[in-house]
Amino acid sequence: MAQAPALPGGFELPLEPRLPRIGSVDQVAVEERADSLSRRSIKRESKLFALDLAVRMMDLTTLEGADTPGKVAALCSKAMRPDPSDLTVPPVAAVCIYPNLVPVALERVQGSGVRVASVATAFPSGQSPLEIKVEETVRVAEMGADEIDMVIDRGAFLSGNYAKVYDEVRRVKEACGDAHLKVILETGELGTYDNVRRASLLAIAGGADFIKTSTGKIQPAATLPVTLVMLEAIRDVYEETGRKIGMKPAGGIRHAKQAVQYLVLLHETLGVEWMTPDLFRFGASSLLNDCLLQIRKEKTGRYQSPDYFTID
Amino acid sequence: MRLPVKKTYKLYVGGAFPRSESGRSYEAEGANVARASRKDLRDAVRAAREAFPKWASMTAYNRGQVLYRVAEIMEGRRAQFVELTGDEAEVDAAIDSWVWYAGWADKLAQVLGSSNPVAGPYFNFTVPEPTGVVGVVALEEPVLAGFVARLAPVIVGGNAAVIVASQKRPLAAVTLAEVLATSDVPGGVVNVLTGRKDELCGVLAAHMDVNAVDLSGAGDERGELERLAADNVKRVVSNGDGQSPWHVAAFLELKTVWHPIGV
Amino acid sequence: MTEIEKRQDRSPVPSAFDYAPAPESREIVTLEDRYGLFIGGEWVEPKSGEYEATISPATEESLAEVAYAGAEDVGVAVESAREAFENGWSDIAPGERAKYLYRIARILQERSREFAVLESLDGGKPIRESRDVDLPLSAAHFFYYAGWADKLEYAFPNRNPKPIGVAGQIIPWNFPLLMLSWKIAPALAAGNTVVLKPAESTPLTALLFCDVVRQAELPPGVVNIVTGDGRAGAELVKHPGVDKVAFTGSTDVGKEIQRAVAGTGKKLTLELGGKAANIIFDDAPLDQAVEGIINGIYFNQGHVCCAGSRLLVQESIYEQVIAKLKRRMGTLRVGDPLDKNTDIGAINSREQLEKIKELVAAGEEEGAEIFQPPCRLPEKGWWFAPTVFTNVAQSYRIAQEEIFGPVLSVLTFRTPDEAVEKANNTPYGLSAGVWTEKGSRILSMAQRLRAGVIWANTYNRFDPASPFGGYKESGFGREGGRHGLEPYMRFE
């Protein structure tokens, strides 16, 4: 089992692998910066570009106890062809579902380019023994999921047991095999931006390919300031080590306007290189239809009605 | 001849105008007015407690703007208030009183607070903060100016209020509540109850989740009410007539903070 | 069923994410061809007969012709203010005086977009700033001081405060409407009347303000606006009918004014230049500190008296901070002030642009290292790319003189004591910034820095309740807060 090196008080990460210093985050300044960026005015062709990109970056999600093969099959159809009346609208990046539904999803999306992401590790709470969480990951990977979204153990994090959090990410990453690993921080439970930064660097140290804000099961989920903090952590890792880590805000992003704001934030913090589904995703469900509405509005000049867009 | 549509006079609680949960009313000034019960008062205190954090955390500037807006809307309804009170001068004074208090919102800290030169390497400062939910028993008269004189100093500092209106002449208070409801005052910051004072004041004075009381309109029962208030150490406030920042200060706590100065 | 493309291993990365132009419409502003002087509640032609064009610095187009007041015109304005003071304004019930000021505040809020567009047109600052900072603060200033008008005995207990009389006020071009509010609001709240001279390159929002005065039904003569150049200002300062002079502008002109009123008994307040140190300690939240540096020097194109124009960075984090700073400078958008996405607008005038260029050239000559991100500057108009100098010595001109442009000079320090020493080592003393996580250090630095405004973990924050003003050659007197009333009062 991988052992995290003994962490001194104040939690400065080990020098190998090299990581940026943790430091602190000023709440007022971060919220102001995010607010200022959200007021950018993105119009016409730049707006269409952003909306198209937002669709391509979406992880279309259903994570309900009531999910059935039928429900997931319909979700997959929507994911592959979001707007049947406008085939220039691209498919989304992935569908995001519970482990039991992975086989159904894989079958439906086969050959379309849409990926299958599954949650694992006792989602959403993570409050289960490590061995069970690792076993779940192994099974999901064996089923053939392309991507795995895990949760960190917030109980361990908030009680200061950072080594445990780190270990779990390492073990789950190992169990993923070829699948990409997204690590969910559940920022709404972490309390401060300092903690969000700390958790981000910890997850990246453990081997995350993506860091993700939320499970979507509690409020607050994704916010612009939290996303900014995580993007800045990713930027520092890149400066220090050259590694490019992806980011996924999830939960609470319902309107196309918000999605565009996130893309502006991404653009001005990390630059165009990150503006690809390989490095940025939206975890959302109702966002897709609002993007379709806005795309059609941009193309026709008329405000649209939800009646004209299928639910799935 | 055209038949006028008569107004229903209800309570103002949580930003809405419900009837009394008891279904009772009483006759005052030729109209049927809701007769609030102890449960209505309970609901009002709950609404005030819920509204308090948001009102208290608004910037002082915003609170001042809201109070000024109350004056704006009241000015628009000047004729209606003159009809209710029969006194133009009283209505003008009431409107101007809102303007006066509105201007205090972002100045209280400068007049009531301080930085204190303690004998040591510490920065020490004192700031005033709202106490929470304040119960007010309004004067029987003057029905409008007296009501405003008791209410404005409570809320300008960030408190939420539960106010028992004049029993004999409650219509001006209810009409003022309509002004509050349309003036950007968040629901629950002010709650107006009409009814019998002997049914309501004791409950208010004894309520364990009320932080301060202004018993100006209580009359003979005052002593007993002050005794009841002692059970959770309520601040019992006796502001005199007129307007003053000290009337506001009576409903504010003072918090002092220390922090060392050093590299 | 159409073909759907197969999964690609790498999704294409866009070459750029350009923001399409997002211009705020100019339609909301109606400009006259020509403006007179606003005296005694009326528009009057200047006895001087002089008019000059006011130019938009972004396009060099002439926006309107504006009167240039001469000595006689200034005299008429002062008399009008005196007349209004003696016959009415000082006797009006204070509560009524307050209501006039509240009206002005509300009207500014209602016409906020119109004023914001005009401000950006005339002065060159980005619409985002005039809309989100200048206008809200201007209205707030009137709202705040309106509240003091009938509460003066609480502001000055036991001092029996009375108005002084006629105030002559001269304001700069960097925040035209805001500076007007900072001057007029407390003066009127205290019961005075005013003659205000806007800066010669930015008269238009002051002239539009006269329409607000009309809508508020302010008694004639309480506010008089005389446009013109330095000559009109000099006449105003020396006019015997002016009881109090308030000036915001350069230190050099401030000294001239101080000499001019010497021995006259006139009250004087000055708000002059600065060369503020923005001090970053190694425990500062770095990304936010970099935002603070950017905001400190590039906000309003650096045309800010309290700009953080000297970056004092602790040596242990120097490399990191400079790298982040340079990268962040690369995302600044210079361009059309009326475009809602513009971060840095035009330089206010050709003269100012020349001054900036001269000092920047001096910086390079003296041996500092210059960095400017690649910037596509428009053809017409006056522009300067955001600039940072590293390897700067304390003695270089760019570390000593106020540039008043988007130019930052970087110096390093090792310890808090050294930071304080370097920060204070200047004849100026308007403002300073301190970035550190440690509370006690914030307070210790605040205690020792000789500056009138100290921002900790933030920068360029203004509020009508917060007193603003300088130490040493940055001037004397405070604007804002209860203290901002004092210069406009007479005490028994």
Image (cartoon, coloured by chain):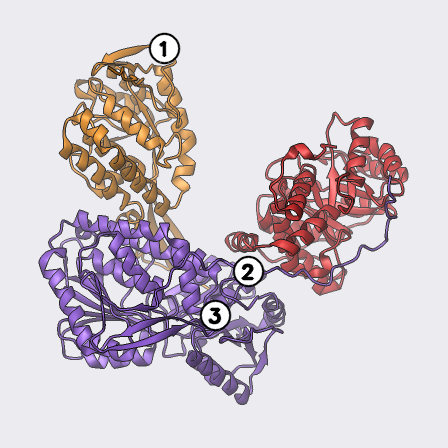
> Which tint is chain A?
red
Q: Are marks 2 and 3 on the same chain?
A: yes
The answer to whether residue A72 is above or below residue C403 is above
Q: Which residue is mark 3?
A: C301
Q: Position of residue A104 (x, y in %)?
A: 86, 32
Q: Are marks 1 and 2 in contact (CB under 8 Å)?
A: no
Q: Position of residue A129 (x, y in %)?
A: 77, 35
The answer to whether residue C285 is above or below residue A286 is below
Question: Which residue sits at x=45%, y=77%?
Answer: C422
Chain on which label 1 sits: B
> Which tint is chain C?
purple
Q: Nearer the viewer, mark 2 or mark 3?
A: 2
Q: Residues within 10 Å of mark 2 (few under 14, many from 20)?
A: many
Q: Position of residue C242 (x, y in %)?
A: 16, 71
Left or right: where A118 falls relative to B186: right
Q: Which residue is mark 1?
A: B23
Q: Nearer the viewer, mark 1 or mark 2?
A: 2
Q: Which residue is mark 2?
A: C341
Q: Amino acid at mark 3?
A: Gln
Compute the Cα span from label 1 to label 3.
Answer: 65 Å
Q: Position of residue A254 (x, y in %)?
A: 63, 40
Q: Amino acid at mark 1?
A: Gly
The answer to whether residue C487 is above or below residue B213 is below
